[in-house]
Image (cartoon, rainbow, N blue to C red):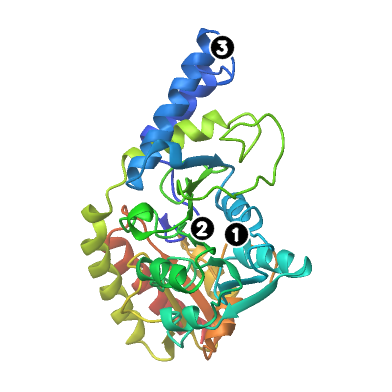
Amino acid sequence: MIYLDNSATTKPSESAVKAAILMMEEEFGNPSSRYTLGLSSERILNEARASVAASLHTNAKNIIFTSGGTESDNIAIIGGANIKAGKRIVTTAIEHDAVKNAFMHLEALGFEVVFVAPEEDGSVKAEKILAAVNDKTSLVSVMHVNNETGAILPIEKLAPMIKRKAPRALFHVDAVQSFGKIDLYPSRWGIDLMTVSSHKVHGPKGVGALYKSDKVTSLKPIVFGGGQEGNIRSGTENMVGIAGFGAAAAEINPDEHYERMAKLKKDFAEKLLALPDVYLNGGLINSSPYILNVSFKGIRSEIMLNALSEEGIYVSSGSACAKGAKGSSTLAAMNVPYPDNAIRFSFSKHTSFEELEETYQTIIKKLEILR
């Protein structure tokens, strides 16, 4: 098996699996319980929170555990939007559905929503985002790395620029695809809210986190109950997932793999783009080394996906977080020439040059058959 769909999910690490099993078999207490078993679970909860915080170079008090990236995005956007602070809210046209649909929900409630269009390479210029912000803006949400093309957006310089134009606006970043792959400093960069997910960094599914700056005091819960997670995300914590997430976060070291992954992607991209009628969707400059999106002219995405799957090579035709056969809104916004022929290859720190060479050779054989 050659697994090249790591933007959809990653294989849990051995330490994450062990941590999750320990919680199911031995440390199964409720962390809100005040007897020994519960207190032991609370200790593991605190350790996991500290581990995730360390991976973001922040403090444990700034980490809210959630059920995943989608819930973190929804809490940040729906819980952060404040119509009294301003009806205008700004995002990009290439956001994940967890962000886009939350904005559309707010639009139905009376907010003025601005979707900033991308460039042809899938990037979104800071100047265009800033131009959409005015003194009536209460929320700006910009992803760090696009989940389909790998385009890296300029979040580090946006926060101070946004605050100068809209001092009351909250700035949220969906960092699901950059977390664990690029060093993140939300506090240093002046970001108010940041979304991360466990199963993109070799942790379990069903758990994520929301970074909340100390300066954010207006964030409202969208789930109500017993007041867990600082009264922002009520409900008994998913300790199996959280323990695994904490173990996976402890192994994060972006600098260890970045250069190798950049070389790996460049080599693979150059080989594919040298083939007839293969087109790059996005750019190779200012792009994540973990994501490559290309179109094979004349071959629909699902045909190529299934052809590779027959050989034990697993790729994606788009975002695996969406059900159904709808087209990619990101590729549509970019006006790529062959969006229905797009294939996304996404890598992890375990991806090897040998795996990509075998994939390349398999693609050559499949192109001869399919064309």
Closer to the N terminus: mark 2 or mark 1? 2
The image shows residue 45, relative to residue 84, as above or below, that is above
Closer to the N terminus: mark 2 or mark 3? 2
Q: Position of residue 271 (x, y in %)?
A: 30, 80
- Say which residue appears at 33% left-offset and 38% top-offset: 250
- Say which residue appears at 41% left-offset and 45% top-offset: 202
Q: Position of residue 269 (x, y in %)?
A: 33, 77
Q: Position of residue 101 (x, y in %)?
A: 68, 65
Q: Nearer the viewer, residue 49 or 205?
A: 49
**Circle 2 sits on which residue?**
8
Closer to the N terminus: mark 3 or mark 1? 3
**Circle 1 sits on which residue?**
321
Can residue 248 be seen here? The reply is no
Can residue 307 be seen here? The reply is yes
Task: Check disc 3 and report its element: helix, strand or loop.
Answer: loop
The image shows residue 90, relative to residue 117, as above or below, that is above
User: From mark 3 to mark 1, how far is it between C-alphas?
Assistant: 38 Å
Q: Nearer the viewer, residue 155 or 169?
A: 169
Q: Are marks 2 and 1 in contact (CB under 8 Å)?
A: yes
Answer few, some or many: residues within 10 Å of disc 2's Cα (few below 14, many 20 plus, some between 14 and 19): some
Which label number is shown at residue 34? Answer: 3
Compared across the picture, whether 37 is left or right of 74 comes to left
For badge 3, the amino acid type reads Arg
For badge 2, the amino acid type reads Ala
